Image (cartoon, rainbow, N blue to C red):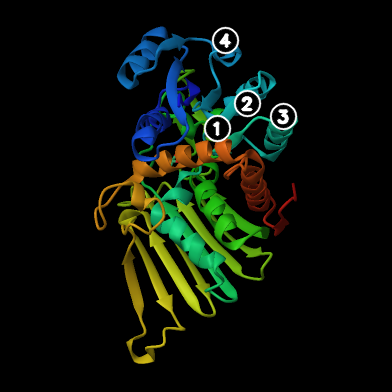
Amino acid sequence: MAKKQLRVGMIGYGFMGRAHSNAYRQVGQFFPSDHQVVLKAACARDPDKARAFADQWGYESVETDWRKLVERPDIDAVDICTPNNLHKEIALAAAANGKAILCEKPLAMNAAEGREMVAAVEKAGVPNMVWYNYRRIPAVTLAKRIVDEGRLGKVFHYRAKFLQDWTIKAELPQGGQGLWRLDVAAAGSGVSGDLLAHCIDTSIWLNGRLESVCAMTETFVKERMHNLTGKVEKVGIDDACTFIGRYENGSLANFESTRYARGHKALYTFEINGEDMSLFWDLHDLHRLQIFDYKDPDARGRGWKSVHVTDGDHPYMGNWWVPGLSIGYDASFTHQVADFIKGLETGKPEGPTFRDALETQSVLDAILDSAKSQKWVNVAKG
Ligand code: SOE
């Protein structure tokens, strides 16, 4: 039987454009379905860059204006890999044209924009998803299964951190290609939207709604040369953000993210402590889930165990190599496309949808409000 085509139009060509394109190319080999992904068009303002990206990843054609791309009848799904300040406009136009949308995280610049995006995709009835890829690292997905089985008992604590060190140098400019994450006009925020967003998404997925937060942010380098204007300009992003909070289930949140933790490149860790079990995960050891099971019948042998999540019956792993052999960061994106396609085929959307990602966006708004007001802030609902 001929497969149904999912013709993708990719907007953007940076790090995430590569990660997503790699996933589209891999998915049919490892997660066969009734759909075949076709890399139809790549879009970038600069025609040479669009062409080079298209050639490298195998896109059939190029566009230099995203408006043209979202109107093309031969595109089924639009992938938004642009800086955050373009997400909303593109998503609204793509939804109005009836396209499925896969949007890079965070969903938007703020929750107000996110709400408009949710309204647009829900009104148009188009499939939608946000690339919070860490949910789909097999060890993290295994943690979700264990939580859903109720094995943790009452949860007391959720703590997470995401640490990097790549912006410590004061001479590093802000803005433009590769450095838009430092420019508040393009990114909306700093580490909160870029790094904490991942931690918050995973935590809501594993531990439920965060209802209130108390945050502190810092901008260590106050001025940087702006690549687009050539002038030294004020830095508007948060370089570091720490917050505590309360979940609806009564547990306490403790989160930290920074780009000033010398020696750490991408140290994302989380730990959940329940009455009966604790779970710990570390991106630098991504195949492992650390489990402490207080209900282990062998009381004297009780202790933390380190599960190498590579067996055939572990999430996603049966589709890869043979038990015991590892996969990597890139696979989380492949899993995300596989699940997106599964959602198309079952009619039951796989998260995080735009609506799910709006919840993270509301937490981010509350964090930035709290840091500014130096007060506890309730997270808005919906
Ligand atoms: C920033 O350095 C970054 O690339 C984020 O934008 C990604 O979302 C994160 O997964 C890794 O770090």
Does label 3 or label 2 sit earlier along the sequence? 2
Q: CA distance from mark 3 to mark 2?
A: 8 Å
Mark 1, secondary structure of its residue: strand
Q: 291 left or right of 204?
A: left
Does label 1 or label 3 sit earlier along the sequence? 1
Q: How many marks?
A: 4
Residue at x-position 53% and y-position 43%: 238
Q: CA distance from mark 4 to mark 3?
A: 19 Å
Judge whether 291 appears above or below 349 on screen.
below
Answer whether labels 1 and 2 touch (C-beta < 8 Å). yes
Judge whether 91 appears above or below 250 on screen.
above
Q: CA distance from mark 1 to mark 2?
A: 8 Å
Residue at x-position 47% and y-position 52%: 257
- Residue 120 is tagged as 3
In the rendered image, which residue does mark 2 sit on? 91
Answer whether labels 3 and 2 touch (C-beta < 8 Å). yes
Within 10 Å of the Cα at label 4, are there few (<14), some (14-19), or many (20+) other Cα atoms? few
Q: Is residue 175 visible?
A: yes
In the rendered image, which residue does mark 1 sit on? 103
